Amino acid sequence: IVELLYASGLRVSELMGLDLDDLDRGELTVRVLGKGRKERIVPYGRQAAAALAAWLARRGETRGPLFLNRRGGRLGVRSVFSIVRGQARAAGILRRVGPHTLRHTFATHLLDAGADLRAIQELLGHSRLSTTQRYTHVGSEHLMRVYDAAHPRAKAR
């Protein structure tokens, strides 16, 4: 759950709504039903694929919700929060961490690595770019790298 949230930037509601049929394990993508019931395809990486493969091997069945609670039903919001917080504590992270923290981190790490803001907007499923801008925290180091790489007079500094 934690790996998929970080690898894809999904909202907690999107994660909870995933079915096994939504995964394309060959393409490493997941079909997501976002806000306003808008569908989008979101990639995820090899580490998330490995975590999902381990989960699916344990889980067994081939249909239904991707993540199950102990009674075999769809996982709820509080359970997802509890899992994320527990994993954060296990990793020695003392501040409060929730699923949305992973979404923000996903966007910020993409931006820091040079991803286009419009691409991040699409991945997050935002209809407005201004919403995406709030998710991204641009560090001064990143700004200097962008300036040095892109501005024609940067070499003159």
Image: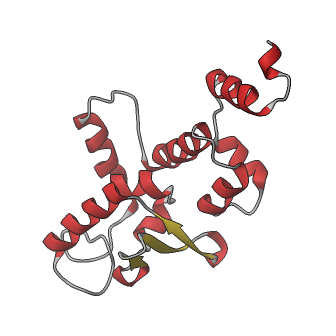
Q: Which residue is at the front of the view, 127 or 29?
A: 29
* Left or right position of 115 against 12: right
Q: Position of residue 138 (x, y in %)?
A: 66, 31
Residue drawn at point x = 22 percent, y = 36 percent: 90
Question: What residue lies at 26% left-to-right and 71% top-to-bottom?
Answer: 68
Name the one closer to the observer, 81 or 50.
50
Residue farthest top in this picture: 157
**Residue at the limit of the structure toward the right, as seen here:** 153
User: Horizontally, is 13 left or right of 107 in the view?
Assistant: left
Q: Tell me, yes or no, if residue 141 can be seen here.
A: yes
The image quarter containing residue 37 is bottom right
Colouring used for the render: secondary structure
Residue 89 place in picture, x, y as percent: 27, 35
Q: Position of residue 43 (x, y in %)?
A: 49, 65
Q: Is residue 50 above or below residue 26?
A: above
Q: Is residue 62 above or below residue 103?
A: below
Residue, x 42% and y 45% (percent of image)?
98
Q: Position of residue 32 (x, y in %)?
A: 52, 73
Quarter of the image with the C terminus in it: top right
- Residue 78 visible, this angle: no
The N terminus: image quadrant: bottom left
Q: Residue at x 57, y 46 (%)?
A: 107
How many numbered tags mark residues here? 0
